[in-house]
Amino acid sequence: MTEITETEAFRKVAAYCAAAEHCRAEIVEKMQRWGLPYDVVNRLADRLEQEKYIDEERFCRAFVRDKYRLAKWGKVKIGQALQLKKIPKLVYLPLLNEIDEADYLSVLRGLLAAKRKSVRAASEFELNAKLIRFALSRGFEMKDIRRCIDVPDEEAFEAV
């Protein structure tokens, strides 16, 4: 395996960051796979942040927008994915709260309507239970799911 110099590494990773949004954790991991020493990796990551190749808030804004609009993920799943990318809660929570509630519920209603067509259930109760599990797996909160499905409250599902 060939050795990569610090200058070459910066040039390569700067081009990588210029092509698409990336967070610091992704860039650090990439440079570590190249076999660069930790001090060099941290120095390069700091330089990338100073020169605005990496910006956690800008990354979060793009990530939240893409996962919400394109992948139709809920806030919980988006938040968990950002935590896995080592993004601080203080950075991503305000961005999640910026999502328009009416638009958010509209996305959820659309997902539930599409899923309802493909779900087989013996009763309305079973159908709602399957739809709730589906919506929870997509990262939507129970309070929002209840607003989109005719379910009185959570205790109704715990009783049976």
Image (cartoon, rainbow, N blue to C red):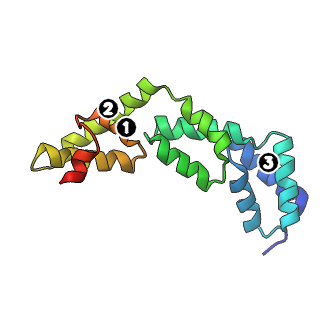
Q: Nearer the viewer, residue 79 or 48?
A: 79
Question: What's the amino acid at mark 3?
Answer: Ala
Q: Which residue is mark 3?
A: 14
Report the side of 17 relative to 7 (left or right): left
Element under disc 3: helix
Which numbered disc, 3 or 1, marks the residue that appears first in the sequence? 3
Measured in 3D between alpha carbons, the distance from the residue under mark 3 to the one under mark 1, in whole angstroms, is: 43 Å
Measured in 3D between alpha carbons, the distance from the residue under mark 2 to the one under mark 3, in whole angstroms, is: 45 Å
Does residue 132 lie above or below 29 as drawn? above
Which residue is rendered at x = 82% and y = 53% of the image?
A: 45
- From the top left corner, tell me how far across and down residue 26 is, in percent: 68, 55
Residues tagged 2 and 3 counted as in contact (Cβ below 8 A): no
- From the top left corner, tell me how far across and down residue 12 is, in percent: 79, 53
Q: Is residue 105 visible?
A: yes
Disc on res. 143:
1
Q: Which residue is mark 2?
A: 147
**Tag in front: 2 or 3:** 2
Residues tagged 1 and 2 counted as in contact (Cβ below 8 A): yes
Q: Nearer the viewer, residue 134 or 27?
A: 134
- From the top left corner, tell me how far across and down residue 138 is, in percent: 40, 47
Number of residues whose C-alpha sits closer than 10 Å to that of mark 2, classed few (under 14), some (14–19) or many (20 or more):
some
- Most extreme residue toward the bottom is 1
Number of residues whose C-alpha sits closer than 10 Å to that of mark 1, classed few (under 14), some (14–19) or many (20 or more):
few
Question: What's the amino acid at mark 2?
Answer: Arg
- From the top left corner, tell me how far across and down residue 96 is, in percent: 55, 35
